[in-house]
Image: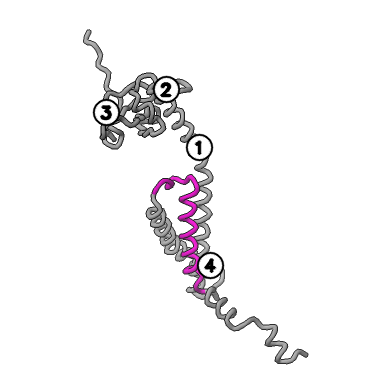
């Protein structure tokens, strides 16, 4: 028969027991902070649809997403857990369900990013081909100032197969631009007489309409 001293030694410390009980009904708070940090990092690193935005916007997106998961997942999951085990306290069930919902959300963000990676790679390859076609035209027809700055290209997608690629011009607020259109397996560029950079032309940019001669 064990003595009282040996039983006390085998029992976990009091602070650890309190921590376990606190986490049992309060894990969602800690999980929320961790989920926001991890989701923000995943959105910034993985080629997810939200990639390319600023860190502040990604943080707000992660916070908003996890708030929805806590509210909806906690309510629905709590009902499901207490239906299976009626003895489970409501607050514990809701906390556990919210935590599981945030874990599932983080897994979903990771999965979407990995699935989006091939599409992102294809977009990068198309961009490289588009810029290369514009550079070939610029080497033949652009002024020396622009030829020396071909690496400073600005690409504006107009449609699925048409792009506007601009390079710096000597005059401030002006650019040397081309229209690049898909032709078979490659891309072909032609000069755009509009000197406005893509930031100024924006939606007004586009291939000029063809004027047909009257019969």
**Residue at point 25% right, 14% down?**
212
Q: Earlier in the sequence, mark 1 or mark 3?
A: 1
Secondary structure at numbered mark 4: helix
Residue extent of the magenta highlight: 25-53
87 is within the stretch colored magenta:
no
The residue that label 4 is drawn on is: 81
Q: Is residue 40 above or below residue 115?
A: below
Name the residue beneath numbered marker 3.
Answer: 195
Eye-nearest disc, 1 or 2: 2
On screen, residue 12 above or below 144: below
Looking at the image, is mark 1 or mark 4 nearer the viewer? 1
Mark nearer the N terminus (3 vs 4): 4
Q: How far from the left and from the top, in percent, is residue 195?
A: 27, 28
For disc 1, the marked residue is: 121
Give the mark nearer the N terminus: 4 vs 2.
4
Is residue 47 located in the magenta-colored stretch of the structure? yes
Main SS of the magenta part reads helix
Relative vertical location of residue 110 with respect to residue 9 in this rendering, above or below:
above
As displayed, is residue 200 above or below residue 97? above
Q: Which residue is mark 2?
A: 136
Graded by Cα atoms within 10 Å as few (under 14), some (14 to 19) or many (20 or more), the crowding at tag 3 reads: some
Badge 4: residue crowd in 10 Å (few <14, some 14–19, many ≥20): some
Q: Position of residue 164 (x, y in %)?
A: 35, 29
């Amino acid at each position: 028969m064990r003595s009282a001293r040996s039983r006390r030694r085998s029992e976990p410390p009091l602070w650890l027991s309190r921590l376990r009980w606190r986490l049992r009904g309060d894990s969602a708070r800690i999980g929320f902070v961790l989920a926001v940090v991890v989701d923000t990092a995943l959105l910034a690193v993985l080629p997810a649809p939200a990639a390319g935005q600023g860190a502040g916007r990604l943080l707000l997106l992660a916070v908003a997403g996890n708030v929805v998961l806590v509210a909806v997942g906690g309510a629905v999951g709590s009902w499901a857990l207490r239906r299976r085990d009626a003895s489970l306290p409501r607050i514990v069930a809701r906390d556990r369900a919210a935590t599981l919902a945030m874990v599932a959300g983080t897994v979903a963000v990771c999965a979407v990013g990995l699935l989006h990676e091939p599409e992102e790679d294809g977009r990068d390859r198309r961009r490289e081909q588009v810029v290369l076609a514009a550079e070939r035209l610029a080497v033949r027809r652009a002024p020396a100032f622009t030829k020396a700055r071909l690496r400073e290209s600005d690409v504006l997608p107009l449609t699925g197969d048409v792009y506007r690629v601009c390079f710096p011009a000597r005059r401030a607020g002006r650019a040397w631009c081309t229209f690049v259109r898909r032709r078979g397996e490659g891309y072909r560029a032609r000069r755009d007489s509009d000197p406005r950079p893509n930031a100024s032309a924006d939606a007004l940019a586009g291939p000029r309409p063809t004027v047909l001669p009257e019969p």
